Image: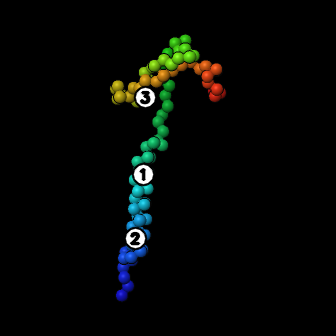
């Protein structure tokens, strides 16, 4: 009579492998929304003359429309300063 495969070392290996696969699936489900892209939109925050080169100005923008105050965020904007900003446009 043959012993079932779940006894001994084979059963332990299968249990660990199954647990690892379950953990990987849960992790993928949890971090999946991070990689979801959202549509881009432009929003007018003011004229170029309203923003100095050496100081940030707080401006409120809407990140998610249709959900009220929860969709609004404060961003800090300043004019590009070649003496500070070394990356090309």
Give me the residue at 56% from left, 16% from top: 54
Marks 2,3: beta carbons within 8 A: no
Q: Nearer the viewer, residue 74 or 62?
A: 74
Quadrant of the snapshot with the C terminus:
top right
Q: Where in the figure is residue 24, as x and y percent of width and height?
A: 43, 56
How far is disc 2 from disc 3 in space, using C-alphas?
A: 49 Å
Give the mark, 2 or 3, whose residue is nearer the N terminus.
2
For numbered disc 1, what is the local secondary structure? helix
**Residue at image coords 39%, 72%:** 11
Label 1–label 3 contact, CB within 8 A: no
Q: Which mark is residue 27?
A: 1
Q: Which mark is residue 12?
A: 2
x, y (%) of residue 67? Answer: 34, 29
- In the picture shown, does residue 42 fall above or below 36? above
Give the label on residue 63, or none: 3
| In the depicted structure, whether residue 27 falls above or below residue 63 | below
Give the class, few, some or many, for how many residues have Cα within 10 Å of label 2's Cα (few <14, many ≥20).
few
Q: Position of residue 63 (x, y in %)?
A: 43, 28
Q: CA distance from mark 1 to mark 3?
A: 27 Å
Residue 47 can be seen, yes or no: no
Distance of label 2 from label 1 (alpha carbons): 22 Å
Q: Secondary structure at mark 2?
A: helix
Is residue 38 placed above or below 10 in the rendered structure?
above
């Amino acid at each position: 009579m043959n012993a079932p495969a779940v006894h001994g070392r084979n059963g332990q290996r299968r249990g660990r492998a199954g647990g690892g696969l379950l953990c990987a699936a849960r992790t993928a489900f949890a971090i999946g929304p991070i990689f979801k892209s959202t549509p881009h939109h432009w929003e007018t925050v003011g004229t170029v003359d309203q923003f100095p080169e050496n100081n940030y100005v707080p401006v409120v923008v809407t990140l998610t429309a249709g959900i009220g105050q929860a969709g609004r965020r404060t961003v800090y904007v300043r004019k590009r300063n070649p003496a500070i900003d070394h990356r090309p446009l």
